[in-house]
Amino acid sequence: MHQEKQGPGRQGLGMALVLFSTICLSVEPVAAKIAYQGGATVMTTLTLRYVLAAVLFWLLILAGGYAFRLTLRQLLAVTALSAGTQALAVLALFEAFRYITAGMAILFLYFYPTVVTILAFFFLKEPFTRQKVLALFLTLGGCAVILGQPVNTLDPRGVVLSLAAAFTYAIFLVGSTRLLASIQTLVYNTWVTTLLAVTLGGLALLRGQLDLSFNTEAMMAIGVLGIVSTVLAMAALMRGVKEIGASRAAIISTFEPVAAALLGFLVLGESLTAWQMIGGAAVLAGVFLQKRA
């Protein structure tokens, strides 16, 4: 599937949507931390997040009168991407947090734009330009500076899990790009969140980790995760992918650590170092290069 050449207006819209998606996702660590502190387990938080998102997407489907039925082939493909790659990416990343620091796990996760760019070249026929290569170096280097920390010992289990999350999420993004050519964005997001809710909820029940005894703050945090970091983020990301392609969207998504650092500084009063600002500038330079990629 060759990515059509979009006009400047459409490209600008696509970039803006992906950037908006990264900002929505940047609140995820803060909201998740509040949920955990309020008594919600990881599996409970993930399950309720996608249940809430699925309910909201289905309400939009019904209110808008959208045709939501998929062909058997489409349903099987969406199921494989949702219950397979995306669910595995989420679980692998959260498991990685058990063995290495969150910052280091996220740093390994941001190897995924490179994987997306390579996969998109072979499977989506998206061009592999010099601007993309330079943008990858700038954004990955910027993420390393922002998230970087002294490394004493790295548990190989954490490294493998976080890299597995990167690869599986890359497959999800590239596969989604192909499916979005024949499935409406809202319909696709509805099925993805529904299947994720069923998959993660089923795992939570099997593990005995679905516990609803959490406080009001945790409930509000899960609401933010469901509405902001899932519904708004997915809607913007998938529409943006339609406009500018998977590889460019993945590179632009590296703005998320920049937004997370700024959010921590503005909301939580966390420190913002000179190195983080330098890393942020490198990421922004790589993002702006996507206008010409």
Image (cartoon, rainbow, N blue to C red):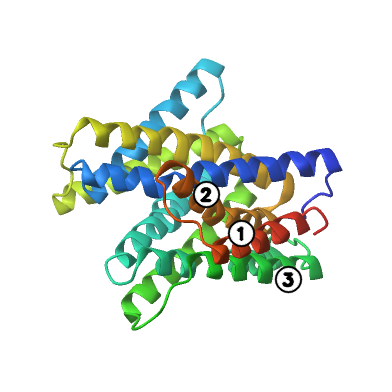
Q: Are marks 2 and 1 in contact (CB under 8 Å)?
A: yes
Q: Amino acid at mark 1?
A: Gly
Give the x, y percent position of residue 89: 41, 59
Q: Nearer the viewer, mark 3 or mark 2?
A: 2
Whole-angstrom CA distance, mark 2 to mark 1, is: 10 Å
Which residue matches tag 2? Answer: 262
Res 6 → quadrant:
top right
Q: Can residue 181 be seen in this snapshot?
A: no
First of labels 2, 1 by sequence position: 2
* Image point (47%, 29%), residue name: 57
Q: Which residue is mark 1?
A: 280
Counting residues from the start of the chain, the first of labels 1 and 3 encountered is 3
Q: Nearer the viewer, residue 103 or 174?
A: 103
Residue 265: give x, y in percent of width and height. 47, 48
Q: Tell me: residue 1, above or below residue 145.
A: above
Classed neighbour count for the residue bearing mark 1: other residues with Cα under 10 Å, few (<14), some (14–19), many (≥20) = many
Q: Write the residue at 40% across / 80% down.
A: 151
User: Residue visible at 38% across and 56% down?
Assistant: 90
Q: Quadrant of the C terminus?
A: bottom right
Which residue is at the far bottom? Answer: 153
Of badges 1 and 3, the one in the foreground is: 1
Secondary structure, mark 3, is: helix
Where is 60 relative to 81, above or below?
above
Percent position of residue 103, x then y: 41, 65
